[in-house]
Image (tube, rainbow, N blue to C red):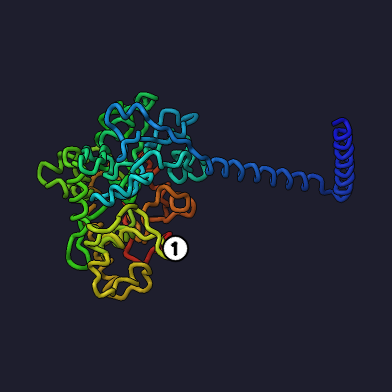
Amino acid sequence: MATMERIGITKLRHHHLLLVVLLLVVAAAGGVGSVQAAEEDEMSGRRRRSRRRRAADVMVPITILNSAVDKGAVCMDGTPPAYHLDPGSGGGNRSWVVNLEGGGWCNNARTCRFRTASRHGSSDHMERRIAFTGIMSSAAADNPDFHSWNRVKIRYCDSGSFAGDAFDEGLKLQFRGQRIWGAVIQHLLDVGMASAEHVLLTGCSAGGLAAILHCDQLRALLPAAATVKCLSDGGLFLDAVDVAGGRSLRSYYGDVVGLQAVAPNLPETCTDHLDATSCFFPQNIIDGIKTPIFLLNAAYDVWQQMHMLRSNLLRNEEHITECKYVTGRFVHQIEQSLAPNAADTSGTWRVCKFNRSACNASQLQFLQGFRDQMVAAVRVFSESRSNGLFINSCFAHCQSELTATWNGGSPALQNKGIAKSVGDWYFGRAEVKAIDCPYPCDKTCHNII
């Protein structure tokens, strides 16, 4: 050990001698100050990049909420619910982002059983650590308005947008989304959220629908003085007509609502005049929600439009995830809502639905019609000064939870990106009611197809 220490000291002296010689040479040339400044700038830049990288790459551990089991709040297979919490710091200690995870639905015995072997039906299969990015990031550069807040993601394992409450004796499956919502939220209130000053309920896709369904419920549980608002990302699912003239998503939602006994947990402002299936569609709910909501959606949402291009196949297929990868491309609402395969009997939509540049004039007109329906669906909603809108003409689905679409070269409307738009709306810095011009005018999109 002594020999190794002597060798190290000798090497260190040698390095110091070389450094002294180098500095003398540079000083003679009159450049010591500039070299030191350059070295300091480079080191400072490295530190900044390192801090950003560490913040962006934080893996947040899971918390299994075993106490919820006694309340009947369990995943489809009976395992406890779970969440991930990254605590706030500094001025964000009394502020909360509560994110409801998305992940599709199940509507029959086969698809629901399948999900119990995945993270969407069992906490046994959930990742023990997940990365928080986008609106969940702790990096100020990536998430300027919410990075220091308490950020929590509630895991999704009920397959009913946290809204069902049933046990299927024949399937031996639990559909307890409403109980999971109640148990986890009560737990968060107990560990500090009860004294929150600012809360933002968010969710993507099926989680975005859940954020709408539970928005007023959360407001009622928090202090009157707290600022409580909700963000639905990619959750504006439309009761639209598919290419065969049917309403395949309505049929699918009807199965979900019936199987999981969702009806009692839907907003009464909707169910007092519409059927339960209609009240699972956000377009029939949003005008009755009292708590301020921000709708972030792609006008050409690729999940909905894909569904309409594939139609009634949903009744018989394994619609087990909300995200599908086809030839390396992420396809969503276009595949699921507008042109399902069963509706596309001639196969004329097969190429178009995976490659928008291959769509002919009549197909593009059909897709433009879907955009028009989305714009019409938010007309009354947009009249409220407390609500916000960011509907861009992109072929995408969910844009708040990825750094690239949240704030890293984000799509922009009115020269303002998504993170800035949501922040301005939440804090009242500006009114945000941005609806994009029709495709293909927007050059800032991160298109999936």
The structure residue drawn at horizontal position 25% and vertical position 62%, both measured from the top left corner, is 308
Q: Mark 1 packing: few (<14 Cα in 10 Å), some, or many (20+)?
A: few
Residue extending furthest toward the left: 273
Q: Nearer the viewer, residue 201 or 224?
A: 201
- Looking at the picture, how far across and down is residue 415, in whole percent? 42, 55
- Looking at the picture, how far across and down is residue 267, in whole percent? 18, 40
- Looking at the picture, how far across and down is residue 80, in whole percent? 35, 33
Q: Is residue 243 above or below residue 253?
A: below
Q: In this view, does 257 lie to the left or right of 395?
A: left
Instruction: Provide the residue designation for mark 1.
Output: 328
The structure residue drawn at horizontal position 26% and vertical position 70%, both measured from the top left corner, is 365
Q: How many labels does the image show?
A: 1
Q: Nearer the viewer, residue 139 or 68?
A: 68
Q: Which of 65 and 206 is in front in this view?
A: 65
Q: In this view, does 263 lie above or below 236?
A: above
Residue 432 visible from this viewpoint: no
The quarter of the displayed image where residue 375 is located: bottom left
In which quadrant is the C terminus drawn?
bottom left
The structure residue drawn at horizontal position 39% and vertical position 35%, both measured from the top left corner, is 83
Q: Which amino acid does label 1 sit on?
A: Gly
Label 1 residue SS: loop
- Looking at the picture, how far across and down is residue 1, in whole percent? 84, 31
The structure residue drawn at horizontal position 44% and vertical position 35%, both measured from the top left corner, is 62
Q: Nearer the viewer, residue 262 or 93?
A: 262
Residue 1 visible from this viewpoint: yes
Q: Is residue 269 left or right of residue 347?
A: left
